[in-house]
Amino acid sequence: MKVINRLREIGAYGGESPYSDGQIPVCSRTGDIVEPMMREQWFLRCDEINDHILDALRSGKLSITPNFLRTKLEDWLSNKEPWCLSRQLVWGHRIPAYRLANDGLVIYPIPNDFREWITATSELDAQRILGLGSRKDVEILQDDDVLDTWFSSSLVPLVIQGWPQRRVEAVPLSLMETGHDIIGFWVARMLTVCQRLTGYLPFSHVLLHGLVRDSTGRKMSKSLGNVIDPNDVIDGISIDAMIDRLNESALSESEKKLASADLRMMYPSGIRECGPDALRFALLRHDLTALDVSINISETAVEGLRFCNKLWNLCSYAKGLWSKAKSAPETRMSVHPADRWIRSCLGGALRSVRMHIDDGSVHLAFSALHKFILAELCDVYLETTKKALWSGDEKRINEIALVLHEVIERSLVVLSVFMPFVSEHLFDDIKTNRQLSIYDHLLSENELSNAMDSELEIAMSIGLAVVSTIRSLRHEFELPTKLPLNISVCSDGPSLSDVESVICDLGNISINSYNRFGSLLENTSLPVPVPGHPVILGVQLDVRFSSFILNRICFNHILLIYFKGEYSELLHKRITSQLEKAEQRKMQFEAKAHKYEKLCDYEGIKQSLLEKNRRKAAQVGRTLTYDQCITN
């Protein structure tokens, strides 16, 4: 208003006109109005230094993981515009530019080149360049601008090598890991600046991770209240403590209100204490090389805590078994199929871990080890050891003890890369050599290369699928697990004879014979397919209700299971009920097929709807054909 009043006083006020598109920039922190000003800036020419890095990419001296982000770096380097280095801030590295002061008065002759800015490493260096020596009657001023933060941080690979005091004579780093969103701001700047200053690339491989988002896909932001402090997952925190911390923050009241509501919705009971290894587990369960990583950190960390408990139970079971090993362990390795199989699986897991780490897929490396420990070591191998433990088979217990020592120790050594605390604690508790720590062991898949047996693993995979199907069959027909089943195997595929003892123990079955595929089944056999493998289970029923199941599905493997006695009547009732349901399903699909056929016959129907109804009619027809095949 003072400006307007003054204009009116001098007769220069011409009135007001509306301008709705005008915007006044205001600093979000201080509330001050931001006024753009024309100022001289320092720039760095980038055409030549960018070309050097592009050549390194094309020649293979520099690699990017994941590879599809290489284009993003190439696009950034292809932009040859000068880089503005100046920042008008009160913190940062001051630009090393100097000039003479004394109000612009030159009190003695100097070359014209020194009347403007010069660059020097220090004020003393600037005095040397200007030829001032130790004169005190001339003042030298350094530019008040500071360097762009990305320029300062681009020197990190050199500084850690002692530069500039020490000369860099090789590539400082083998790997640089960072987020893909700053590939141009930081990665490109490190490459160009370090290569220009030393003649060497700062690193030869770049691994880029995605942006970590919350479980709903939103970017983590303090104003949204969805940022997770790692200490909250490690130590645990109540929802009240989370709200109190939020209220003490510098957010506005409206932002606090929104963030508080989100916190109460996402963590109604706070965050459970999980520990650092469970936090690592939660992060490693996601593809960190994806562009966006949506993660529910608290729930996944609880899964990691359960995995830690599983490891503790594994070691506890092993210690109980070792206590029953009466004699000293044998020096030669066991030839039992379960022992050879688990050692072969361990060798394969070690190979996968190494391969995926070399590829930069850390999450896949952890997944391979996690799968081995849970699905193969705990869920299968330990189950094969229980019969010997319960029966007191001393020879077999000694064999198992030797194998468990090797497999668990090696597994914990590899796991220490991902979950160091629980791995070291359990390793120290079970290790055979009390003088060595977990970090004294260097493992390689080559150490188990002789133990790897692909044919055995294939046979075991089929055998485990058979056991799973038998268990599903028991559950479906409510048959007790203690009921032994007699089986005949017909197959043209890999023989299961090598793993027969393992299958029989796990499934409580007996294999009577092996026959070629296509062999005639008995009239009272019920073929049941094994999902994921060319296997069929044939259940032997009595003649009262076997006629309607003679033509069931057949694949390459056929298992004939003979049920006798009191369970045959139960099976009769169960199968009759299933056939009735199948008949009802058939009638429903026939009605649908009739409806779609009538719609297709309607003359005024649109072409798009006609094609849609024809597709639905064909789909119903395929379903009816499949059901007819099953029930015939």
Image (cartoon, helix red, strand yellow):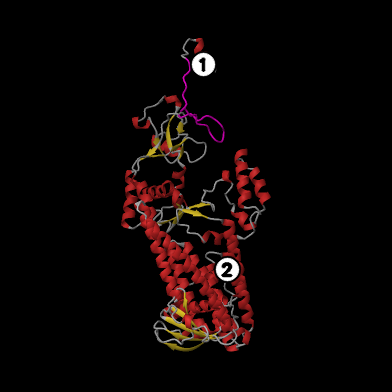
Q: Which quadrant does the N terminus fall into?
A: top right
Which of disc 2 and disc 1 is earlier in sequence? Answer: 1
Q: Magenta span has 24?
A: yes
Measuring from the top left, give residue 370's x and y in whole percent: 52, 68
What secondary structure is the stretch in magenta mostly built from?
loop
Whole-angstrom CA distance, mark 1 to mark 2, is 75 Å
Measuring from the top left, give residue 13's x and y in whole percent: 48, 13
From the viewer's perspective, tell me whether residue 268 is left or right of residue 174.
Answer: right
Measuring from the top left, give residue 391's x and y in whole percent: 62, 87
Residue numbers of the magenta segment: 15-36
Measuring from the top left, give residue 593's x and y in whole percent: 42, 63
Q: What residue does disc 1 label?
A: 4
Q: What residue does disc 2 label?
A: 423
Q: Please, is residue 509 above or below residue 88 in the view?
A: below
Q: Nearer the viewer, residue 33 or 161?
A: 33
Q: Secondary structure at mark 1?
A: helix
| Residue 444 seen by the camera | no
Q: Magenta span has 483?
A: no
Residue 151, by quadrant, is top left
Q: Nearer the viewer, residue 64 or 376?
A: 376
Q: Please, is residue 372 above or below residue 132 in the view?
A: below
- Picture residue at 46% right of the left edge, 24% below the top: 19
Please state which amino acid type lies under the numbered disc 1: Ile
- Picture residue at 39% right of the left edge, 53% below the top: 69
Q: Are marks 1 and 2 in contact (CB under 8 Å)?
A: no
| Residue 234 seen by the camera | yes
Please state which amino acid type lies under the numbered disc 2: Ser
Circle count: 2
The 10 Å Cα crowd at callout 2, few under 14, some 14 to 19, many 20 or more, is many
